[in-house]
Amino acid sequence: MNYIKQYLDEVKNIVDSTHQRSIQQIIESMIELRQKGGRLFLLGIGGSAANCSHAVNDFRKICGIECYTPTDNVSELTARTNDIGWESVFVDWLRGSKLTSSDGVFVLSVGGGSSEKNISVNLVRALDYAKEIGAKVFGIVGRDGGYTAKVADACVIIPSVNPETITPHTESFQSIILHLIVSHPSIKVSEMKWESVK
């Protein structure tokens, strides 16, 4: 029972410590991206990749934003990984998607990527390409935000309250914040099913 209480207390601390202005910046940027007819590309690995897939559904269905993630197409992802390598798989996918300056790249990651530590270098390369093209960069990341936080136009860093639970809290709060964003009255264009039932 002590671990349960500790974990839930940590959740409360994260809620109280999360930077709300950063969330608002992402919402405003998503509205602007939609108005320009830009597309949104979500990048993530592991549990964050699953959150990307969920977010694609919500941004498309609830917010009316054209949205994609490379991890939804396992055939292309594994072919690119096999043929060109894991480190360049996302950047080459963005090139194949014809990323433009009207588009956005949204990273979900526990650490945000780091070339120096050789962690999630595929995210770093994709972000370098996005900045080179002039696409907007967004993130929901943990720890210190890594490379994503350094280059993002708007980024939410999930506060680290316990070094033993950084990953579960970050991946959980990616989902919480994404749901906050897509359900915000200023961005949603379609009601969700249960909210529309009278």
Image (tube, rainbow, N blue to C red):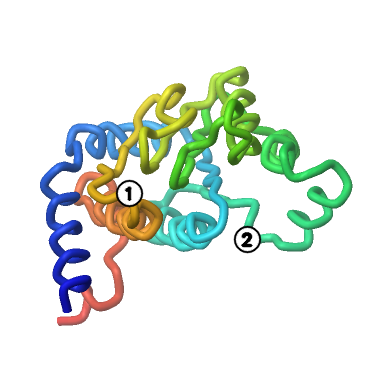
Q: As shown in the figure, which amino acid type bears the numbered disc 1?
A: Pro
Q: Quadrant of the C terminus?
A: bottom left
Q: Residue at x 44, y 47 (%)?
A: 110
How far from the left and from the top, in percent, is residue 29?
Answer: 34, 32
Who is closer to the viewer here, 17 or 198?
Answer: 17
Q: Secondary structure at mark 2?
A: helix
Q: CA distance from mark 1 to mark 2?
A: 30 Å
How far from the left and from the top, in percent, is residue 6?
Answer: 17, 64
Who is closer to the viewer here, 94 or 37?
Answer: 94
Q: As shown in the figure, which amino acid type bears the numbered disc 2?
A: Asp
* Side (left or right) of 41 relative to 85: left
Q: Secondary structure at mark 1?
A: loop
The relative height of residue 138 versus residue 180 in the rendered view (above or below) is above
How far from the left and from the top, in percent, is residue 178?
Answer: 33, 53
Q: Earlier in the sequence, mark 1 or mark 2?
A: 2
Q: Which mark is residue 163?
A: 1
